[in-house]
Image (cartoon, rainbow, N blue to C red):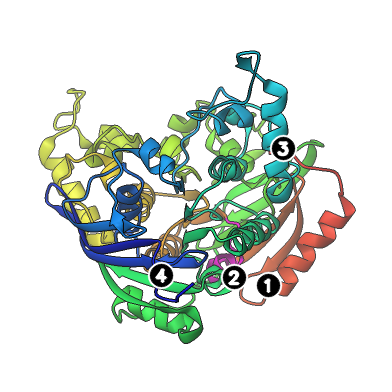
């Protein structure tokens, strides 16, 4: 097949949402049987481009061609009919349905005697899942799966039927290292079978390991396309940022102060073993472990959701409030969950409503009037927009009009103008670009330097080594190692983790 053969060709594509220009001249060409990387900062236009390709949005200008013929799907189902499969960054699953049922939503079920053949359906799903995630609980309702397991369900949904082009938007953002490795094997097999893959990732190591070529977007435009073998990591970062210098590693600028958070022998995890940890003023403490280690559950417990703390947890030497998240907020505790779409933001509401939601009482024009002051809200939004570099249109626009990275910055940054003693963060930079990641790290460091304590959970080892003053390695609901962030390296962290894994060979649940 000639090297210049194009399966998909996009030229000068444009898309506008009100006053926001999302795409302003995107060019993209994907060849049959290649893995094509797509990178760019948050807000560069990647997700909008994908939604145009999948029929969710109609472009305002430019052309799209598939096999040389004009291409403009009327909707996602039309795009699937033409051979496209899309794994979106944001999860779109039915919580009460099982994984198997979600995988076949909107698709033709195998039938027998005119009825759905559930046995054949399950066999078909399990055959595909065997390569990607053989231990995924396919019969369990989505509401009882972890975010990483839900991501695997989205991937299986796209792979359950043959495709000409599979579009993957941050498919490994919530996966463990082992799950990501299996996904990479699947991508390579798709390429070897002649299926094209458009692979979107902020993990540049993935781009270089998997992709034949890479296209870089910046501010809604294509700025470069080249073979990955002809580029370096620094080349990509430079093209994505436009030459903006990236901050280096973030470390504490002062010795840690007195304890802000103390957990003393809290019965936790599957075995209800006692768990203890301390977070001091001025330090960032990272929880690192595989999916199912208990990191997210621990943060939710501290936030007041789920199992009680039974007076085993103190904040500034006093007991945690027993009135749930509202009481935690009054004690100066803030929380940014892992899944911003379903747990952190209200996607139907405006940017302003989401930014002010945790502290609505602070925006009242009159203390006795239970409604926010428009002037106070607008001043607050203008400050967040400038201070966090949130790329947005009007404050009244839906939060869904922002890119994933800008949603993340807003979800974390909305707490920072208020007094914070303890900031809890679950995967704070999941699916964000290198620039937004540095900004979020700087925000965390500023809070710690101002006297707060920060406790974060992350599956990104590079991030943990970049930002953490102390690293707590978790496995099976317990802390199995504590390392000083300034002295630790990746080998030490993984050695501690896998030593614990070898001691606990049983399968883990979320």
Tell me the quarter of the picture where residue 371 sits.
Answer: top left
Mark 2 and mark 3 in contact? Answer it, CB < 8 Å.
no
Q: Nearer the viewer, mark 2 or mark 4?
A: 4
Q: For numbered disc 4, what is the local secondary structure?
A: loop
Q: Position of residue 387 (x, y in %)?
A: 25, 61
Q: Quadrant where the C terminus lies?
A: top right
**Does the magenta run of residues contain 368?**
no
The first of marks 3 and 1 along the sequence is: 3
Q: Position of residue 224 (x, y in %)?
A: 32, 77
Mark 3 and mark 4 in contact? Answer it, CB < 8 Å.
no
The first of marks 4 and 1 along the sequence is: 4
What residue would you read off at disc 2?
A: 465
Q: Nearer the viewer, mark 2 or mark 3?
A: 3
How far, Cα to Cα, is label 3 from label 4?
Answer: 35 Å
- As drawn, the label of residue 490 is 1
The first of marks 3 and 4 along the sequence is: 4
What residue would you read off at disc 3?
A: 126
Question: Is 396 on the left-hand or right-hand side of 471?
Answer: left
- At horizontal 14% and vertical 32% (from top left) the residue drawn is 365
Mark 1 and mark 2 in contact? Answer it, CB < 8 Å.
yes
The first of marks 2 and 3 along the sequence is: 3
How far, Cα to Cα, is label 2 from label 4?
Answer: 43 Å
């Amino acid at each position: 097949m000639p090297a210049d053969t194009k399966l998909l060709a996009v030229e000068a594509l444009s898309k506008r949402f009100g006053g926001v220009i999302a795409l302003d001249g995107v060019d993209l060409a994907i060849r049959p049987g290649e893995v094509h990387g797509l990178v760019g900062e948050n807000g560069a236009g990647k997700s909008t481009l994908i939604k145009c390709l999948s029929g969710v949005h109609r472009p305002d200008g430019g052309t799209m061609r598939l096999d040389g013929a004009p291409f403009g799907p009327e909707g996602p189902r039309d795009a699937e009919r033409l051979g496209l499969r899309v794994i979106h960054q944001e999860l779109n699953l039915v919580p009460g349905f099982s994984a198997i049922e979600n995988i076949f939503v909107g698709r033709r079920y195998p039938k027998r005697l005119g009825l759905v053949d559930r046995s054949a359906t399950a066999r078909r799903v399990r055959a595909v899942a065997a390569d990607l995630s053989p231990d995924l609980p396919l019969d369990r309702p989505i509401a009882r799966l972890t975010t990483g397991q839900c991501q695997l369900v989205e991937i299986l949904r796209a792979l359950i039927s043959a495709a000409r082009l599979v579009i993957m938007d941050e498919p490994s953002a919530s996966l463990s290292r082992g799950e990501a490795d299996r996904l990479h094997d699947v991508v390579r097999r798709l390429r070897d079978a002649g299926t094209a893959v458009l692979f979107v990732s902020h993990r540049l190591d993935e781009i270089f390991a998997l992709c034949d070529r890479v296209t870089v977007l910046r501010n809604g435009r294509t700025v470069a396309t080249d073979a990955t073998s002809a580029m370096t990591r620094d080349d990509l970062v430079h093209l994505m940022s436009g030459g903006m210098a990236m901050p280096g590693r973030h470390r504490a600028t002062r010795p840690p102060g007195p304890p802000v958070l103390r957990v003393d022998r809290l019965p936790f995890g599957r075995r209800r073993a006692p768990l203890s940890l301390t977070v001091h003023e001025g330090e960032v403490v990272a929880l690192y472990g595989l999916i199912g280690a208990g990191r997210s559950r621990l943060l939710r417990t501290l936030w007041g959701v789920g199992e009680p703390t039974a007076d085993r947890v103190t904040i500034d030497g006093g007991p945690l409030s027993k009135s749930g998240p509202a009481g935690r907020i009054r004690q100066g505790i803030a929380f940014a969950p892992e899944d911003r779409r379903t747990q952190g933001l209200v996607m139907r509401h405006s940017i302003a409503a989401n930014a002010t939601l945790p502290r609505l009482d602070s925006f009242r024009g009159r203390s006795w009037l239970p409604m926010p002051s428009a002037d106070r809200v607008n001043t607050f939004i203008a400050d967040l927009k400038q201070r966090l570099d949130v790329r947005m249109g009007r404050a009244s626009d839906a939060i869904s009009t922002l890119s994933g990275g800008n949603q993340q910055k807003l979800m974390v940054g909305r707490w920072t103008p208020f007094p914070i003693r303890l900031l809890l963060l679950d995967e704070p930079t999941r699916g964000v670009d290198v620039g937004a990641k540095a900004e979020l790290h700087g925000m965390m460091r500023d809070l710690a330097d101002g006297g707060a304590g920060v406790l974060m959970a992350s599956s990104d080892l590079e991030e943990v080594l970049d930002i953490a003053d102390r690293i707590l390695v978790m496995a099976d609901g317990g802390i199995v190692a504590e390392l000083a962030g300034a002295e630790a390296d990746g080998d030490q962290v993984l050695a501690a983790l896998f030593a614990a894994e070898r001691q606990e060979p049983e399968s883990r649940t979320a």
